[in-house]
Amino acid sequence: MEEKIKQLKMLKNAVILAHYYAPKEVQAVADYVGDSFYLAKVAKQSCADVIVFCGVYFMGESAKILNPQKKVLMPDITADCPMAHMVKPGLIEKIRAKYDDVAVACYINSTARLKSQSDVCVTSSNAVKIVRSLPNKNIFFIPDRNLGRYVAEQVPEKNIILNDGYCPIHNFLTAEQLRNEIAEHPNAVVLSHPECEREVLELSDYIGSTAEIIDYAKLSPASEFIVCTEEGVVFKLGEDNPDKSFYFPKPHPCCKDMKLNTLQGIISVLEKEENSVEVSEEIRLKALKPLERMLELAK
Ligand code: 13P
Ligand code: SF4
């Protein structure tokens, strides 16, 4: 299958992008593997005709918004992020009416429609920096209440208004599960994603995006780590650090939507050029502004 994917990529001038949560065999055939911010940057810079996005739908949408002239294909078009939809209809308008000096900061894990109603996008690796740099006093942070709360703690000079969305995978990883893992590995360094709840972050030694967690583990002199994010990161962690041990709280956090990306799916979309991500031009133009503003402010 790997050989077939190579041939099809050449034939179609295609590039494969995969998130760290995709299955390991998919990460292994991808041209670029990374966190949400890195993949958005790569999608913008790509000169391929076809982008095969092995992630979830909002990632494919962001790639399409940044590259309207390219085909963006997903191995499984039903791979979706539940959090991407978690803003009540009409709430953004209500908040805008209530506050006169407000910016809507939209986590990239959101639908194109939500982005189109926002002032700036952020990812977990640049949210603190971008929110701090905004001229507005009030920030409506959508959709993730956990990342929003983490940003509020790092940027106390802003009034951050939280929305009630969350990632089911990170949110339901409990402090008790983490304590049990710490009891089994008392010397391990705890690395957590800011999509986790406060109680989990309070037990952590380092908080960062998936790419930041991976970088931290590589540079750290420690040899044992407990990782509070989706288990797919273990592929890169193991590749970078063959002599270090990585543990996950049990049951291991697993995003079933990310696992819908398969080698067979990649072959099938490359052959048939189906599962193409489409965004209406009206929404695309509105969603492009906050995405481009993020890429600019994060520089
Ligand atoms: P990052 O890749 O930005 O860390 O985001 C994690 C995530 O949940 C992606 O769906
Ligand atoms: Fe969405 Fe969470 Fe899955 Fe990321 S891990 S795609 S935030 S459900």
Image: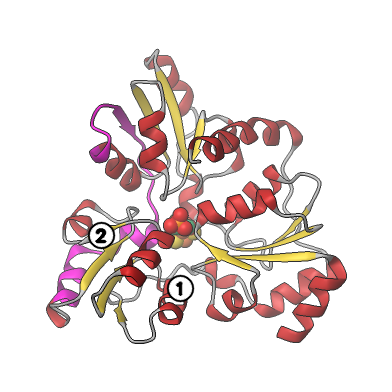
Residue 74 vs 232, above or below: the answer is above
> Residue 79's x, y, as percent?
59, 62
The one nearer the camera, 278 or 248, is 248
In the figure, is residue 3 to the left or right of 28? right
Mark 1 lies on a secondary structure that is: helix
Quadrant of the displayed image that contains ligand 1: bottom left
Question: Magenta region: which residues?
Answer: 153-182
Mark 2 lies on a secondary structure that is: strand
Residue 31 vs 116, above or below: the answer is below
Mark 1 and ligand 2: say if the CB distance to the nearest ligand atom is below 8 Å. no
Disc 1/disc 2 C-alpha distance (Å): 19 Å
Note whether residue 162 is visible: yes
Q: Residue furthest top?
A: 100
Note whether residue 1 is visible: no
The stretch drawn in magenta includes residue 146: no
Of the two numbered discs 1 and 2 in the rendering, the one whose residue sits closer to the viewer: 2
Please tell me in which quadrant of the rendered image residue 242 appears. Answer: bottom left
> Residue 253's x, y, as percent?
37, 70
The label shown at residue 206 is 2
Labels 1 and 2: the sequence-earlier one? 2
Who's the residue at 62% across and 35% down the image?
A: 287
Residue at numbered disc 1: 232
In the figure, is residue 30 to the left or right of 108? right
- For mark 2, does the 10 Å Cα neighbourhood hold few (<14), some (14 to 19), or many (20 or more) residues? some
Who's the residue at 69% across and 68% down the image?
A: 75
Residue kind at label 2, given as amino acid type: Tyr
In the figure, is residue 290 to the left or right of 138? right
The label shown at residue 245 is none
Residue 208 vs 249, above or below: the answer is above
Q: Residue furthest right?
A: 11
Residue kind at label 1, given as amino acid type: Gly
